[in-house]
Amino acid sequence: MSAVVEASQGTAPEPSPEDAPVTAAKRWRTPIILGVVALVSLIVFGLGSKAGETTSFSISRASDFFTVDTFTLPTRTTAIVASLLALALAAYSAWAVSQSRKTGWWLPVVFGIAVMFALLAWAGGGRGATDIQITGLLTGAVVLSVPLVFGSLSGVVCERSGIINIAIEGQLLAGAFLAAVVGSATGNPYIGLIAAPVAGALVGMLLALFTVKYWVNQIVVGVVLNVLVIGVTSFLFGTLLRDNANLNQNLGMADLPIPLLSKIPIIGPVLFDHNLLVYLMYAAVGVLSVMLFKSRWGLRVRAVGEHPTAADTVGIKVNRTRVRNTILGGALAGLGGAFFTVASGLAFGKEMTAGTGFIALAAMILGRWRPSGALAASVMFGFAIALKDQLGIIGSPIPSQLLAMLPYIVTIFAVAGLVGHARPPAAEGIPYKK
């Protein structure tokens, strides 16, 4: 009001504190983390390598259109150069922060590749006839990310509508169990694949019932459902399946290589030489990406998750949308559970998901509640698991206990780096009471 009076009298108003420009705080956490990791890589993998040792890398298969010979690099030089590249990227990240510039997604990707190359060079140094299988490592990353992708997509579908889905672990386990039983009973793994999402949807129905109808705390219900599914499947495994081995057979789905594409070196075996479930994963990510952000259905779902009251005023059935999305999310996670049994040629085992559902939750957060982001984060976690297996095969000096911890360490650091940056849907976890 005083500013208006002063303006009418022809005098310039004194600037108020509210009128002062707001300067965004500079975030130095990422450059510091990158710098520390790069220095550790230089000291441990670079300077810690023995002089004179070499590391062999293999990147192609005999069935490819053309083959690339296995190449050998000096271990210490390779690890040092890769670590120095990572250190330079960390310095560039610090410069970008000082100039308030965004670096884009390419920097952490290139940084990760540099550190991983230094690690692989160090781990494979002096191993004689043992090669680092680059194609096998990347193929394993894609395959092992399948349940993570379906689990994280389940979380995206549920949480975009406002329901926190902590029950992904139970949905994956239920899908694995029913896929194994139905597939074994019918002798057809593809029928088991169809049955898997039914089991996940049933768990999703229970989650929707207690959270939407009875307004029970969503996190508590999710944890309870995980424990319930573990208990039920363990009981049935110890009674029904143990006495009836024909209901828990080792069934597997054949690979379906895509003609021509599967013969391309590296890209072919990594992306185009898998079983049906992997291709369904590609389709699920693509369809959900379009539906969530390019369709009326997706607009309504996001409206329900962000501002349910406003959505209700324009005629959107908030609770009905949440129930349907929770069931759909459960079905997606259940389909991912088939990976552990019929898609991998394994019989069902107690608690065989081993915390995959919780890593999928981390992938959803890291992917910022977007299908494409969830896919990228899941592949990263799948790479961590494949890397653990690869290092174990070549006889890495890293202790086996630390290798077993690797996927979970990556999960913790990835999610910790997003604290304060990733914003969930505004109405997530809040029941709509009407």
Image: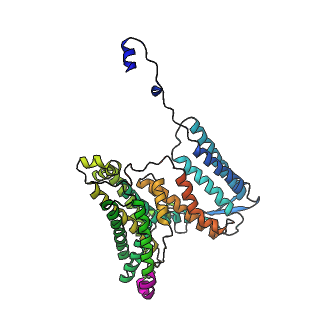
Q: Residue furthest left?
A: 315
Q: Which residue is drawn at 56% across and 34% down?
A: 99
Q: Is residue 26 left or right of residue 1?
A: right
129 relative to 98, above or below:
below
- Residue 179 visible in this rendered orientation of the protein: yes
Q: In this view, does 167 lie to the left or right of 128?
A: left
Q: Residue 240 magenta-drawn?
A: yes
Where residue 51 sits: x, y (%)?
A: 77, 58
Q: Residue at x 32, y 54 (%)?
A: 291
Q: How is the image coloured?
A: rainbow
Where residue 136 sits: x, y (%)?
A: 55, 66
Where residue 277 sits: x, y (%)?
A: 41, 68
Asked which quadrant contains residue 60, the reply is bottom right
Where residue 23 sits: x, y (%)?
A: 51, 32
Q: Which residue lies furthest to the right in this view?
A: 51
Q: Which residue is drawn at 55% across and 47% down?
A: 107
Count of numbered circles in the view? 0
Q: Quadrant of the C terminus?
A: bottom left
Q: Residue furthest top?
A: 10
Dominant SS in magenta: helix
228 relative to 184, above or below:
above
Q: Is residue 3 left or right of residue 320?
A: right
Q: Quadrant of the N terminus?
A: top left
Q: Nearer the viewer, residue 146 or 74?
A: 146
Q: What stretch is highlighted in magenta?
A: 237-247
Q: Residue 79 magenta-drawn?
A: no
- Residue 252 visible in this rendered orientation of the protein: no
Q: Which of 29 and 332 is in front in this view?
A: 29
